[in-house]
Image (cartoon, rainbow, N blue to C red):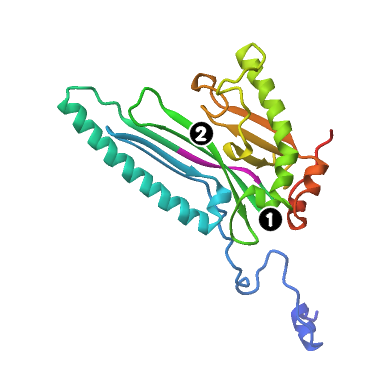
Amino acid sequence: MRAAIPLAVLLAACGQQATPPANQVEGPAPATKPAQPAAKAFALDEKNDLLEFHYGWSAEVAAVPQLVAQFSAAMDKTKAELLANAESDKAERARQDFPFNPYSSSTDYKTAGATGGLLSLRVDVASYTGGAHGNYGSSALLWDRRLGKQVELPTLFTTAENMERLLTQPWCDALNKAREEKRGEPVGGSGMFDECPKLSEISIIPTDKDGNGRFERLVMVADPYVAGPYAEGDYEIELPVTGDLISAIRSEYRENFEAQPQ
Protein backbone atom coordinates (compact mmCIF):
# COMPACT_ATOMS: atom_id res chain seq x y z
CA MET A 1 0.00 0.00 0.00
CA ARG A 2 1.27 3.45 -0.84
CA ALA A 3 1.74 5.84 2.08
CA ALA A 4 -0.86 8.61 2.23
CA ILE A 5 0.49 12.00 1.25
CA PRO A 6 -0.32 14.66 3.90
CA LEU A 7 -2.94 17.19 2.83
CA ALA A 8 -0.60 20.08 3.67
CA VAL A 9 1.96 18.76 1.17
CA LEU A 10 -0.63 18.47 -1.59
CA LEU A 11 -1.91 22.00 -0.95
CA ALA A 12 1.61 23.39 -0.89
CA ALA A 13 2.28 21.74 -4.23
CA CYS A 14 -0.77 23.52 -5.63
CA GLY A 15 0.35 26.90 -4.25
CA GLN A 16 -2.22 26.91 -1.43
CA GLN A 17 -1.87 26.96 2.33
CA ALA A 18 -3.54 24.60 4.71
CA THR A 19 -6.18 26.08 6.99
CA PRO A 20 -5.30 25.34 10.62
CA PRO A 21 -7.87 23.70 12.82
CA ALA A 22 -10.23 26.06 14.67
CA ASN A 23 -8.54 25.34 17.99
CA GLN A 24 -5.03 25.97 16.66
CA VAL A 25 -3.52 29.48 16.84
CA GLU A 26 -0.99 30.50 14.21
CA GLY A 27 1.54 32.89 15.70
CA PRO A 28 0.86 35.74 18.12
CA ALA A 29 -2.49 37.57 18.02
CA PRO A 30 -2.38 41.06 16.50
CA ALA A 31 -1.73 43.82 19.04
CA THR A 32 -4.86 45.64 20.19
CA LYS A 33 -5.18 48.90 22.10
CA PRO A 34 -6.17 48.18 25.68
CA ALA A 35 -9.62 49.43 26.66
CA GLN A 36 -9.51 52.68 28.59
CA PRO A 37 -11.15 52.52 32.01
CA ALA A 38 -14.34 54.56 32.34
CA ALA A 39 -14.24 57.65 34.54
CA LYS A 40 -15.29 56.91 38.10
CA ALA A 41 -17.14 59.00 40.63
CA PHE A 42 -14.95 60.63 43.28
CA ALA A 43 -15.53 60.96 47.01
CA LEU A 44 -13.30 62.14 49.85
CA ASP A 45 -14.43 61.46 53.42
CA GLU A 46 -12.37 62.46 56.44
CA LYS A 47 -13.21 62.79 60.12
CA ASN A 48 -11.22 63.98 63.12
CA ASP A 49 -11.81 65.86 66.37
CA LEU A 50 -12.09 69.15 64.48
CA LEU A 51 -13.97 68.41 61.29
CA GLU A 52 -16.12 65.88 59.46
CA PHE A 53 -15.53 66.53 55.76
CA HIS A 54 -17.10 65.13 52.59
CA TYR A 55 -16.51 66.20 49.00
CA GLY A 56 -17.59 64.31 45.89
CA TRP A 57 -18.54 64.44 42.23
CA SER A 58 -20.17 62.15 39.72
CA ALA A 59 -18.53 59.98 37.05
CA GLU A 60 -19.68 62.45 34.38
CA VAL A 61 -17.75 65.20 36.16
CA ALA A 62 -14.70 62.94 36.45
CA ALA A 63 -14.65 62.71 32.65
CA VAL A 64 -14.15 66.49 32.30
CA PRO A 65 -10.57 67.48 33.27
CA GLN A 66 -11.41 71.18 33.59
CA LEU A 67 -14.13 70.48 36.14
CA VAL A 68 -11.97 68.03 38.07
CA ALA A 69 -9.22 70.66 38.35
CA GLN A 70 -11.71 73.34 39.40
CA PHE A 71 -13.46 71.21 42.00
CA SER A 72 -10.21 69.76 43.37
CA ALA A 73 -8.85 73.26 44.01
CA ALA A 74 -12.12 74.31 45.67
CA MET A 75 -12.08 71.16 47.82
CA ASP A 76 -8.55 71.78 49.08
CA LYS A 77 -9.28 75.45 49.83
CA THR A 78 -12.56 74.70 51.62
CA LYS A 79 -11.01 71.99 53.76
CA ALA A 80 -8.00 74.11 54.73
CA GLU A 81 -10.16 77.10 55.71
CA LEU A 82 -12.58 74.99 57.75
CA LEU A 83 -9.77 73.25 59.63
CA ALA A 84 -8.12 76.58 60.48
CA ASN A 85 -11.42 78.09 61.66
CA ALA A 86 -12.33 74.99 63.68
CA GLU A 87 -8.92 74.93 65.36
CA SER A 88 -9.21 78.61 66.29
CA ASP A 89 -12.78 78.17 67.54
CA LYS A 90 -11.84 75.16 69.67
CA ALA A 91 -8.96 77.04 71.28
CA GLU A 92 -11.14 80.05 72.05
CA ARG A 93 -13.88 77.91 73.57
CA ALA A 94 -11.32 76.12 75.72
CA ARG A 95 -10.14 79.47 77.11
CA GLN A 96 -13.73 80.38 77.97
CA ASP A 97 -14.50 76.88 79.29
CA PHE A 98 -17.17 76.30 76.63
CA PRO A 99 -17.69 72.96 74.84
CA PHE A 100 -16.62 72.64 71.23
CA ASN A 101 -18.72 70.84 68.64
CA PRO A 102 -16.77 69.65 65.60
CA TYR A 103 -17.44 71.42 62.32
CA SER A 104 -18.88 69.57 59.34
CA SER A 105 -19.00 70.19 55.62
CA SER A 106 -20.49 68.22 52.74
CA THR A 107 -20.37 69.08 49.03
CA ASP A 108 -21.76 66.90 46.24
CA TYR A 109 -21.79 67.55 42.50
CA LYS A 110 -24.52 65.26 41.16
CA THR A 111 -25.43 64.71 37.52
CA ALA A 112 -28.96 65.95 36.88
CA GLY A 113 -28.68 65.17 33.19
CA ALA A 114 -26.11 64.65 30.44
CA THR A 115 -27.00 65.39 26.82
CA GLY A 116 -24.84 65.46 23.73
CA GLY A 117 -24.07 69.13 24.24
CA LEU A 118 -24.64 69.90 27.91
CA LEU A 119 -23.82 68.48 31.33
CA SER A 120 -26.20 69.66 34.05
CA LEU A 121 -25.08 69.37 37.66
CA ARG A 122 -26.95 69.80 40.90
CA VAL A 123 -24.67 71.01 43.69
CA ASP A 124 -25.82 70.13 47.23
CA VAL A 125 -23.93 71.73 50.11
CA ALA A 126 -24.39 71.39 53.87
CA SER A 127 -22.28 72.72 56.73
CA TYR A 128 -22.11 73.28 60.46
CA THR A 129 -19.67 75.83 61.90
CA GLY A 130 -20.70 76.13 65.49
CA GLY A 131 -23.96 78.06 65.25
CA ALA A 132 -27.42 77.20 66.52
CA HIS A 133 -27.95 74.87 63.58
CA GLY A 134 -26.34 73.81 60.33
CA ASN A 135 -27.06 75.30 56.95
CA TYR A 136 -27.69 73.68 53.59
CA GLY A 137 -28.55 74.67 50.06
CA SER A 138 -28.41 73.81 46.39
CA SER A 139 -27.12 75.41 43.23
CA ALA A 140 -26.86 74.56 39.55
CA LEU A 141 -23.91 74.26 37.20
CA LEU A 142 -24.29 73.91 33.44
CA TRP A 143 -21.31 72.80 31.36
CA ASP A 144 -21.21 73.36 27.60
CA ARG A 145 -19.37 70.36 26.12
CA ARG A 146 -18.85 72.06 22.75
CA LEU A 147 -17.38 75.25 24.20
CA GLY A 148 -15.61 73.48 27.05
CA LYS A 149 -16.80 75.94 29.67
CA GLN A 150 -19.54 76.74 32.16
CA VAL A 151 -22.56 78.64 30.82
CA GLU A 152 -25.50 80.29 32.56
CA LEU A 153 -29.04 79.09 31.88
CA PRO A 154 -30.34 82.50 30.65
CA THR A 155 -27.72 82.48 27.87
CA LEU A 156 -29.40 79.41 26.36
CA PHE A 157 -32.46 81.50 25.51
CA THR A 158 -32.82 83.86 22.57
CA THR A 159 -33.32 86.60 25.18
CA ALA A 160 -33.26 86.50 28.98
CA GLU A 161 -36.70 88.15 28.95
CA ASN A 162 -38.13 85.07 27.26
CA MET A 163 -36.97 82.88 30.12
CA GLU A 164 -38.52 85.25 32.66
CA ARG A 165 -41.78 85.40 30.71
CA LEU A 166 -42.15 81.64 30.37
CA LEU A 167 -41.01 80.50 33.81
CA THR A 168 -41.91 83.17 36.37
CA GLN A 169 -45.68 82.64 36.57
CA PRO A 170 -45.57 78.80 36.57
CA TRP A 171 -42.87 78.93 39.24
CA CYS A 172 -44.80 81.34 41.47
CA ASP A 173 -48.08 79.42 41.10
CA ALA A 174 -46.45 76.10 41.97
CA LEU A 175 -44.51 77.64 44.87
CA ASN A 176 -47.62 79.16 46.45
CA LYS A 177 -49.40 75.81 46.21
CA ALA A 178 -46.47 74.12 47.97
CA ARG A 179 -46.43 76.87 50.61
CA GLU A 180 -50.11 76.38 51.33
CA GLU A 181 -49.57 72.64 51.79
CA LYS A 182 -46.77 73.24 54.29
CA ARG A 183 -48.48 76.08 56.17
CA GLY A 184 -52.01 74.73 56.10
CA GLU A 185 -53.40 78.09 55.01
CA PRO A 186 -53.56 80.28 51.90
CA VAL A 187 -50.56 82.44 51.09
CA GLY A 188 -51.32 86.12 51.39
CA GLY A 189 -50.40 89.36 53.03
CA SER A 190 -47.15 91.21 52.70
CA GLY A 191 -44.90 89.14 54.92
CA MET A 192 -41.27 88.59 53.94
CA PHE A 193 -42.05 84.97 53.02
CA ASP A 194 -45.23 85.70 51.07
CA GLU A 195 -43.47 87.19 48.06
CA CYS A 196 -42.38 85.03 45.15
CA PRO A 197 -38.56 84.89 44.85
CA LYS A 198 -37.13 86.00 41.52
CA LEU A 199 -35.66 83.38 39.20
CA SER A 200 -32.24 84.86 39.91
CA GLU A 201 -32.70 84.01 43.62
CA ILE A 202 -33.28 80.28 43.11
CA SER A 203 -31.48 77.39 41.43
CA ILE A 204 -32.87 76.17 38.10
CA ILE A 205 -31.54 72.74 37.18
CA PRO A 206 -32.22 71.22 33.72
CA THR A 207 -32.97 67.57 34.47
CA ASP A 208 -33.17 64.34 32.47
CA LYS A 209 -35.02 61.92 34.73
CA ASP A 210 -35.76 59.27 32.12
CA GLY A 211 -32.11 59.12 31.04
CA ASN A 212 -32.74 59.45 27.31
CA GLY A 213 -30.18 62.21 26.78
CA ARG A 214 -32.56 65.18 26.75
CA PHE A 215 -33.83 67.50 29.47
CA GLU A 216 -37.57 67.11 29.92
CA ARG A 217 -38.03 69.17 33.10
CA LEU A 218 -36.58 72.03 35.10
CA VAL A 219 -36.08 71.54 38.84
CA MET A 220 -36.47 74.85 40.70
CA VAL A 221 -35.00 74.98 44.20
CA ALA A 222 -35.43 77.76 46.77
CA ASP A 223 -33.10 77.31 49.74
CA PRO A 224 -34.18 77.87 53.35
CA TYR A 225 -34.85 81.57 54.07
CA VAL A 226 -35.43 82.25 50.34
CA ALA A 227 -39.12 81.29 50.04
CA GLY A 228 -39.88 80.49 53.68
CA PRO A 229 -38.41 80.39 57.20
CA TYR A 230 -35.76 77.86 58.10
CA ALA A 231 -38.36 75.63 59.76
CA GLU A 232 -40.11 75.16 56.39
CA GLY A 233 -36.92 73.89 54.78
CA ASP A 234 -36.29 74.32 51.09
CA TYR A 235 -38.86 74.33 48.31
CA GLU A 236 -38.30 72.14 45.27
CA ILE A 237 -40.61 72.54 42.27
CA GLU A 238 -40.50 70.60 38.98
CA LEU A 239 -41.72 72.32 35.84
CA PRO A 240 -42.12 70.38 32.58
CA VAL A 241 -40.29 71.54 29.49
CA THR A 242 -42.88 72.82 27.00
CA GLY A 243 -42.88 73.42 23.29
CA ASP A 244 -43.05 77.18 23.90
CA LEU A 245 -39.99 76.93 26.11
CA ILE A 246 -38.01 75.05 23.47
CA SER A 247 -39.02 77.63 20.85
CA ALA A 248 -37.53 80.34 23.07
CA ILE A 249 -34.18 78.52 23.31
CA ARG A 250 -31.40 79.33 20.88
CA SER A 251 -31.32 76.95 17.93
CA GLU A 252 -27.92 75.45 18.79
CA TYR A 253 -29.24 74.27 22.17
CA ARG A 254 -32.76 73.08 21.28
CA GLU A 255 -31.77 69.48 20.59
CA ASN A 256 -30.79 69.13 24.27
CA PHE A 257 -34.44 69.53 25.36
CA GLU A 258 -37.70 67.68 24.74
CA ALA A 259 -41.25 68.85 25.41
CA GLN A 260 -43.48 67.03 27.86
CA PRO A 261 -47.14 66.25 27.11
CA GLN A 262 -49.46 68.86 28.59
Crowding near the residue tagged with mark 1, few <14, some 14–19, many ≥20 C-alpha atoms within 10 Å? some
Looking at this view, name the residue that lies furthest to the top: 184
Foreground of the two, 21 or 240 = 240
Task: Say whether marks 1 and 2 touch (CB < 8 Å).
Answer: no
Q: Is residue 122 above or below residue 26?
A: above
Residue located at (80% from left, 81% from top)? 2
Coordinates of residue 53 in the picture (x, y in percent): 38, 37
Coordinates of residue 256 in the picture (x, y in percent): 73, 50
Q: Which residue is mark 1?
A: 117
Q: Is residue 108 magenta?
A: yes
Looking at marks 1 and 2 on the same chain, the residue that comes earlier in the sequence is marked by 1
Query: Main SS of the magenta segment?
Result: strand
Q: Is residue 219 above or below residue 159?
A: above
Looking at this view, name the residue that lies furthest to the front: 190
Give the quadrant of the N terminus.
bottom right
Residue located at (50% from left, 40% from top)? 108
Residue 211 visible, this angle = no
- Residue range in magenta is 107-113
Q: Is residue 65 above or below residue 120?
A: below
Q: Which residue is mark 2?
A: 137
Helix, strand, or loop for circle 2? Answer: strand
Quadrant assignment, res 121: top right
Coordinates of residue 51 in the picture (x, y in percent): 32, 35
